[in-house]
Image (cartoon, rainbow, N blue to C red):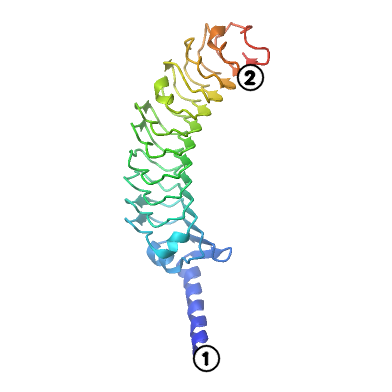
Amino acid sequence: MNIIPWIFTLTAMSLAQDLEINNKCSYTMGKAVFVCSGLQNITHNIDTFITPHTRMLVIKNSDEIIFPTYYHNATNYAHLVNYNIIDNNALNINECAFYGLSNLQYMKITGNFLHTLKNRSFCGLNKLELLNLSQNNITRFNANTFTGLQALLTLDLAKNNIKVLSSNVFIELMYLKILHLEHNNIQQLQKNCFLGLVHLEILDLRFNAIQIIRAEDFNILHELNSLYLSFNQISVITGDLKLKKLSFLSIDHNNLAQIEDNTLKYVINIQSIDMSYNNLSNLTDTIFCHLSSLKHLNLKNNNINTNFSTLQKNVSVIL
């Protein structure tokens, strides 16, 4: 009798039992997806059982999760493509904690009561395309937080507690296309807060507490297509928006009382503008007369008497 296969079988059975009962982890789709819930000891559970075949790792509903520097710098982590860290009681990410996840493309870190993003938290994630940090309690981060994310296309920071967007915080993210900042408590946009986002196409700032929009802060976003500013406290737009690729602008449900004649003069490719539910009055046709691509204009629930008769006939106006 060959004793080696027999011993191996017993060992495998023991490991499987330990995996399912003691470690609260399980595989699905073969060993491609590894899900761990209610963990007490991350290192024992994950490091012991993750395999070179694992492409998705999920850690959820556990106690405090602490990732030290270079925690993931082990061979088997290099094969991960998708990593979800969700709904844990607490999370602490140290500098370069994810270094070693060299093939990771998608990361979701949501609902973990994460307060602070430290410098170089995501260094080494050279292939990461999507980073979802929504539904935490993040209050601050800086220009070095996102160092190393040279392939990032989508960043989701929605539903946190960010009050100030500091200067240069996104300067490392030159290829970013989509930025979600809605449902925070943003009150201030510091100068150059969007510097570096030369390929950004979609910017969502809805449901914040912004009071003043300075055109110069947005004019560096040369590829911007859609700008969402609804449900803020915006009362003033200073300067002229010069976003030549902008197609959609929503600034409804704010406190705007006036728009200067040249504010929108240079958004020549704009197709849809929503300024409903403001305090606008005395608007003139000259504000929109240069917008030859305009198709939809929503001015509902303002104090406007003008009928905008000089607009092109194909423009749909809601008053």
Image quadrant for the N terminus? Answer: bottom right
Q: Is residue 244 above or below residue 78?
A: above
Compare residues 265 and 88 and report the one nearer the observer: 265
- Real-space Cα distance between discs 1 and 2? 79 Å
At 48% from the left edge and 85% from the top edge, which residue is drawn?
A: 7
Q: Residue furthest right?
A: 313
Q: Is residue 18 above or below residue 136?
A: below
Please state which amino acid type lies under the numbered disc 1: Asn
Q: If you read the primary sequence from the N terminus, does the residue marked by circle 1 or circle 2 appear first?
A: 1
95 vs 60, left or right, is left
Please state which amino acid type lies under the numbered disc 2: Lys
Which quarter of the picture shows residue 318? Answer: top right
The answer to whether any part of residue 212 appears in the image is no
Compare residues 184 and 261 and report the one nearer the observer: 261
At 62% from the left edge and 7% from the top edge, which residue is drawn?
A: 310
Q: Secondary structure at mark 2?
A: loop
Label 2: few (<14), some (14–19) or many (≥20) C-alpha neighbours in 10 Å: some
Report if the CB atoms under discs 1 and 2 are less than 8 Å apart: no
95 vs 281, left or right, is left
x and y, in percent, of residue 251 in the image: 51, 22
Which quarter of the picture shows residue 188? Answer: top left
Q: Is residue 272 above or below residue 136?
A: above
x and y, in percent, of residue 43 in the image: 38, 64
Q: Residue furthest bottom?
A: 1
Q: Which mark is residue 295?
A: 2
Which residue in the structure is indicated by mark 1? Answer: 2
At 38% from the left edge and 27% from the top edge, which residue is drawn?
A: 187
